[in-house]
Image (spheres, rainbow, N blue to C red):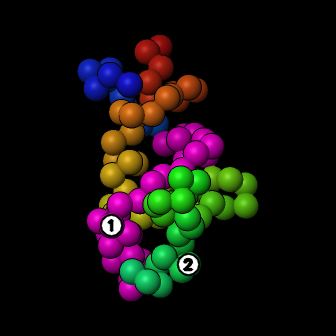
Amino acid sequence: MDASVPFVCRRCGACCRWPGSVLLEAEDVAAAAAALGLAEEDFIARHAALARNRAQLTFKEAPDGACEFLQADNGCRIYAARPRQCRAFPRGWRVAGCPGLDPG
C-alpha cells in the first residue's frame, strides 16, 4: 500500500482477524513482554509460536483465528507495545475490506 493513501483507523478489528502472521522481531518480543510484566522467556512460552517460515516467532492466535491480544471492543491489549508490523499497518499489507481506507 502506498504511504500517501490516507488512513484513519476506525477500530473495526478486521486487520487483527485477517489470516496471516504478525512476524515478531526481538524488539517486539521485549516490548510486548514488558507491557505484560513478563520475562521474555515467559512471554514466548505463553504468547508466541513458531511462524510458518520456521525462522521467526509470531503471536499465538485466539481460537477464532484472531490475534490473541484483540479485545472485545476491538482495542489491542498491548497497543502501546504492539509490534512494528502492526504499527506500520496498512503499509506493507494487502488490504481488502478495511473501512479506514474507504474513501467514502
Tag 2 secondary structure: helix
Would you say residue 64 is visible in this rendering?
yes
Marks 2 and 1 in Cβ contact (< 8 Å) = no
Of 69 and 40, nearer the camera is 40
Please tell me which residue is depicted at 53% across the width and 69% down the height of the picture: 48
Q: Which mark is residue 46?
A: 2
Q: Position of residue 89 (x, y in %)?
A: 39, 39
Where residue 11 appears, as percent x and y from the top left, is: 49, 42
Residue 53 drawn in magenta: no
- Left/right placement of residue 23 relative to residue 81 reads right
Residue 13 drawn at (x, y percent): 55, 44
Q: Residue at x 39, y 80 (%)?
A: 40
Residue extending furthest toward the right: 63
The residue pinned by badge 1 equals 26
- Seen as rendered, the residue at the extreme left is 4
Which of the two labelled residues, at mark 2 and mark 1, occupies the earlier sequence position? Answer: 1
- Name the residue type under label 2: Arg
How crowded pointer 2 is (Cα within 10 Å; few <14, some 14-19, many 20+) is rated as few
Give, as a single range, the part of the protein colored magenta: 11-39
Check residue 33 for magenta coloring: yes
Does 102 appear above or below 24?
above
Q: Looking at the picture, which amino acid does disc 1 mark?
A: Ala
- Examine the rendering and report whether any part of residue 69 can be seen: no
Q: Provide the secondary structure element on which disc 1 rests.
A: helix
